[in-house]
């Protein structure tokens, strides 16, 4: 029986992460919780992943000889590993106007997205990967090219701290630009609420292009409970910050169809993303950041 | 018990509180404009556009506003917290001056005991002992033993001062915190010796309610106009020949038995109409009868027995006119008026229409000397229908037969009315507020209203800032 480590972990709620201090502390705290939750040491890294055995040839490093196989077969084999130490990754964070929404008593979605990106950057840079940052609020921009140098984490966290919500640019352009900057197949992580025109079709297409390049694509969808419909707000005149207008008089708390429509939208979007080989991870600003990341990691391992 | 001095203002506050309540019920506000990034998934609801917007703070705001108006009304209404009403309490003012000497003292102490001690032994009020000064007795000490000791000790030897007793009433009433009303009883022979100038003003200032004045059984303490003596005695009219026939006839018509001056037997009343007709033997007999309790009526400008005369010469005579006797008899004149005024300590039996004294009486021995400042047979006086009744009143003399109390001449009906309280019902009680004081709460209500106003402002301001 698999033990559910996350159930026993005492993760900090997002509201309390704000009090920890800067994003560096948050990133370290969340990453440690995340690693502890998936039972893996960050020291091992992705560069030591076993690939296959090959017959020994003169000139091979004797340190790679598999002596257990030699004892069983009297033949010399060396172990070959998949080289992942220089995996390139770009974190694409959504700073559009809708990401400023927090809901009563909650943290803004943009802040929550920054927690996710910071924790992932901390984790991946610790594993030897190179990590960059792209945003697409008012216009698509590659804030930080993927690198694994010392100080990269600091620069990335600094840019995350300075992110301000605004604009309504789609994620597609930023994803394309991220793919262009990755030299080989890499990893693109999108953290967004995915609220775009055209039911997010442009983003799905961009994800398809990345997958066609051989990139690994992970999409973290961030929503508040009010948007999800689990804690819908009361009656009011509601408007979308990315769609200026007179607003819609409605009572979400008295409309059971609201939550269903939201769920249908994101279910359809998730299905299209998965069709293109992307991983889709729904997150709520009401849950600890580590819990969502652990859920994602377990999905990958399974 | 909460009491309001001006309850109408409290009612006004309650009515005013209906205004915010009505506004709250009829107010229509558009729904609040709010951000929701997933607004595209909302289903437009026409009812929401006109539905009354209710914030969670609305009910609290309404409650604060209603409370504010009610508190303002209550503050203006003069609220006061009064102790729980416990019926009528008694304040007994017991005269322990020398005027109480005799049976009156025992009767007065008994009356005080019955008034202050309930049958179960509980104390129903406060006792104030007074003569020239007043001192309240400790409530815890009001026991049957105390009253027994008072009876044994008897009254003191000092003179009474009713003003001192009256001034003690408010303090004694305040001590009776648990009562909703207070009844004051004055146990005294009520003599002029206890009367001081300005006593009516002290009476009004000290106690707004009435004061009960029980009659003590001592005959000397009977009220002047309330205990008429039965005119069934014998009367001697001493006058020169041809004079006194109207007096004799009138007295005979009222039940008196006229006798001759030289009869030798002592009479109950003597009318000496002419000093020349009073020889020394007659005068001696009159004086002896006076000592024994008879009434001697003198009149005219030069009456005999001048040393006993309750009258002082002097002043202007003034017009005569009708005579008003203290028993209500009106004797039409015109009569010849003799100048002068009653002697100090004497009792006024009759007055002229202008208020001047017309007849006075004073004790002498066991008897009474009456002086009429007019000639009883002059002019048209004997022709008046009230003439017999007026003479009978004079023959009755002082209304307090027997020995004159050590305290002096009893108060007349007017003075008693002043002490009793004009227009007040006997035994009535004072208002609870006057009797037991109370804790004023107006300022506290105003302070509470101020706090509520601040809370309302903070809540309303904070509510506007909430998106």
Image (tube, rainbow, N blue to C red):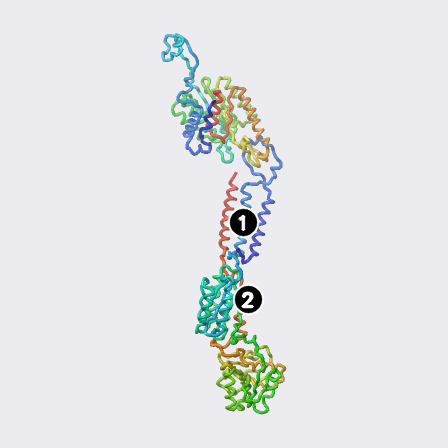
Q: CA distance from mark 1 to mark 2?
A: 43 Å
Give the percent coordinates (x, y) of residue A244.
56, 33
Q: Decide: is A73 above or below A243.
A: above
* Residue placed under numbered mark 2 in the picture: B427
Q: Decide: is A101 above or below B178.
A: above
In the image shown, does B316 or A23 lie closer to the viewer? B316
Instruction: Write down the chain letter for disc 1.
Output: B
Give the percent coordinates (x, y) of residue B135.
44, 67
- Residue at figure coordinates x 41%, y 33% from the top left: A21
Give the percent coordinates (x, y) of residue B335.
58, 84
Cβ atoms at labels 1 and 2 below 8 Å apart = no
* Residue placed under numbered mark 1 in the picture: B67
In the image shown, does B32 or B413 lie closer to the viewer? B413
Q: Decide: is A64 above or below A158.
A: above
Residue B181 appears left or right of B45: left
Give the percent coordinates (x, y) of residue B310.
50, 82
- Residue at figure coordinates x 53%, y 68% from the top left: B212
Residue at disc 1, secondary structure:
helix
Residue at disc 2, secondary structure:
loop
Disc 2: CA contacts within 10 A as few (<14), some (14-19) or many (>=20): some
Residue B40 visible? The answer is no
Disc 1: CA contacts within 10 A as few (<14), some (14-19) or many (>=20): some
Q: Quadrant of residue A201?
A: top right
């Amino acid at each position: 029986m698999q033990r559910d480590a996350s159930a026993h972990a005492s993760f900090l709620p997002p509201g309390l992460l704000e009090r920890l201090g800067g994003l560096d502390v948050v990133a370290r705290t969340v990453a440690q919780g995340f690693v502890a939750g998936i039972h893996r040491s960050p020291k091992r890294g992705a560069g030591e992943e076993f690939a296959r055995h090959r017959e020994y040839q003169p000139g091979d490093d004797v340190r790679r000889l598999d002596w257990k196989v030699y004892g069983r077969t009297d033949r010399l084999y060396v172990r070959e590993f998949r080289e992942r130490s220089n995996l390139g990754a770009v974190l694409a964070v959504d700073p559009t106007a809708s990401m400023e929404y927090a809901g009563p008593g909650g943290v803004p979605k943009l802040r929550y997205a920054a927690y996710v990106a910071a924790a992932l950057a901390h984790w991946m840079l610790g594993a030897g990967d190179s990590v960059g940052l792209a945003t697409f609020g008012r216009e698509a921009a590659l804030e930080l090219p993927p690198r694994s140098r010392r100080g990269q984490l600091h620069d990335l966290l600094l840019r995350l701290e300075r992110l301000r919500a605004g604009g309504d640019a789609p994620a597609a352009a930023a994803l394309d630009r991220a793919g262009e900057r990755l030299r080989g197949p890499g990893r693109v992580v999108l953290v967004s609420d995915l609220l775009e025109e055209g039911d997010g079709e442009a983003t799905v297409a961009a994800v398809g292009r990345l997958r066609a390049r051989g990139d690994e694509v992970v999409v973290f969808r961030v929503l508040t409970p009010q948007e999800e419909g689990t804690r819908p707000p009361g009656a009011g005149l509601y408007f979308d910050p990315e769609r200026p207008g007179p607003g819609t008089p409605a009572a979400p708390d008295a409309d059971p169809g609201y939550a269903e429509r939201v769920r249908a939208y994101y279910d359809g979007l998730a299905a299209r993303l998965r069709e293109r080989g992307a991983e889709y991870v729904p997150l709520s600003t009401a849950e600890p950041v580590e819990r969502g990341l652990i859920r994602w990691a377990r999905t990958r391992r399974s | 018990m909460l009491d309001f001095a001006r309850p109408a203002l409290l009612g006004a506050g309650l009515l005013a509180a209906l205004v915010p309540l009505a506004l709250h019920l009829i107010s229509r506000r558009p729904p609040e404009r709010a951000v929701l990034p997933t607004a595209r998934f909302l289903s437009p609801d026409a009812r929401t556009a006109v539905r009354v917007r209710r914030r969670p703070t609305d009910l609290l705001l309404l409650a604060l506003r209603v409370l504010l108006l009610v508190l303002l009304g209550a503050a203006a209404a003069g609220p006061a917290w009064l102790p729980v009403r416990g019926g009528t309490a008694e304040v007994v003012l017991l005269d322990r001056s020398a005027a109480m000497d005799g049976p009156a003292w025992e009767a007065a102490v008994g009356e005080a005991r019955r008034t202050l001690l309930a049958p179960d032994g509980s104390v129903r009020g406060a006792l104030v002992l007074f003569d020239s000064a007043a001192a309240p007795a400790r409530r815890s000490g009001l026991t049957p033993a105390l009253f027994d000791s008072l009876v044994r000790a008897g009254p003191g030897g000092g003179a009474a001062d009713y003003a001192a007793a009256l001034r003690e009433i408010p303090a004694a009433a305040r001590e009776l915190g648990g009562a909703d009303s207070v009844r004051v009883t004055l146990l005294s022979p009520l003599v002029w010796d206890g009367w001081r100038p300005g006593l009516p003003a002290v009476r009004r200032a000290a106690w707004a309610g009435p004061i009960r004045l029980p009659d003590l059984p001592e005959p000397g303490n009977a009220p002047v106009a309330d205990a008429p003596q039965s005119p069934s005695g014998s009367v001697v009219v001493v006058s020169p020949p041809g004079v006194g026939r109207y007096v004799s006839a009138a007295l005979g018509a009222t039940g008196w038995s006229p006798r001759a001056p030289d009869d030798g037997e002592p009479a109950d009343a003597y009318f000496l109409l002419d000093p020349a007709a009073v020889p020394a033997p007659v005068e001696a007999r009159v004086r002896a009868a006076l000592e024994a309790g008879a009434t001697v009526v003198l009149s005219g400008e030069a009456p005999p027995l001048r040393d006993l005369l309750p009258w002082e010469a002097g002043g202007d005579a003034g017009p005569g006119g009708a005579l008003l006797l203290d028993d209500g008899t009106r004797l039409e004149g015109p009569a010849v008026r003799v100048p002068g005024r009653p002697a100090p300590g004497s009792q006024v039996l009759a007055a002229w229409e202008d208020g001047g004294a017309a007849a006075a009486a004073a004790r002498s021995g066991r008897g009474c000397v009456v002086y009429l400042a007019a000639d009883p047979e002059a002019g048209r006086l004997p022709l008046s229908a009230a003439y017999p009744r007026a003479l009978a009143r004079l023959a009755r003399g002082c209304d307090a037969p027997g020995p004159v109390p050590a305290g002096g001449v009893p108060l007349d009906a007017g003075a008693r009315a002043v002490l009793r309280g004009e227009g007040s019902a006997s035994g009535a009680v004072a208002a609870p507020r006057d009797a037991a004081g109370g804790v004023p709460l107006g300022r506290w209500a105003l302070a509470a209203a101020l706090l509520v106003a601040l809370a309302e402002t903070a809540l309303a301001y904070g509510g506007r800032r909430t998106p």
